Amino acid sequence: MSTIGTKRSWKHFRVDRRNPRYCHVTFDHPPINTITATTVAELSDLAGLIEQDPDLNVVVFDSANRDFYLAHYDLENDPGRTEALGVGPTGLSAWIDVLVRPSGSCSGGQHRLDPGARPRRRERVRARL
């Protein structure tokens, strides 16, 4: 089994590794899922784990908040921490790096994994091609 699991303590999301090929990530940073330096650092760590996992084929992202998938980037609470993250493996700033790293994957809402599947509202799917 992979290094991505539910045993790790994440602050801004929950990870449910349902089987070796499938992982469910729920953004859960009340009250409105603002993006902070912590969010970016955790997503960067998660992206690294996803990239290193040869068994993982599908990662589904959703939100614990029905009204907000992810809200704005909150610079007021931690502007220094955001800058201190530096650049990621792509050479881009940490936040942009997290957005572009899932290369070789498709993304979008409401993808069906099998004919009987019914995606939940505001669910996002990432699958390796």
Image: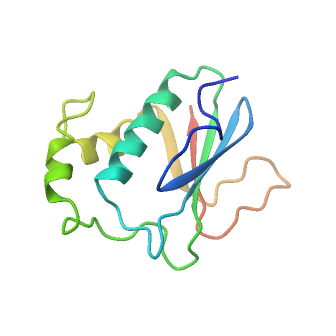
Residue 126 seen in render: yes
> What color scheme is it?
rainbow
Residue at (20, 51) in percent of width and height: 82
Picture coordinates of residue 90 (x, y %)? 25, 29
Quadrant occupied by the C terminus: top right
Q: Residue furthest right?
A: 116
Q: Can residue 102 be seen? A: no
Q: Please name the residue shown 38% across and 39% down the image.
A: 44
Give the side of residue 13 with respect to residue 45, left or right. Answer: right
Residue 95 x/y as whole percent: 27, 48
Front in this rendered view, residue 6 or 46: 6
Of the pair 10 and 44, the residue shown nearer to us: 10
Measuring 15% from the left and 58% from the top, which residue is drawn there?
A: 79
Specify whether 119 is left or right of 51.
right
Q: In x, y percent, where is residue 37?
A: 28, 52
How many marks overall?
0
- Residue 102 screen position, x and y as percent: 43, 37
Above or below for 74 versus 80: below
- Which quadrant of the figure contains the N terminus? top right
Asked whether, in this view, residue 69 is left or right of residue 85, the answer is right
Q: Residue at x 58, y 77 (%)?
A: 66
Left or right of 11, for residue 24: right
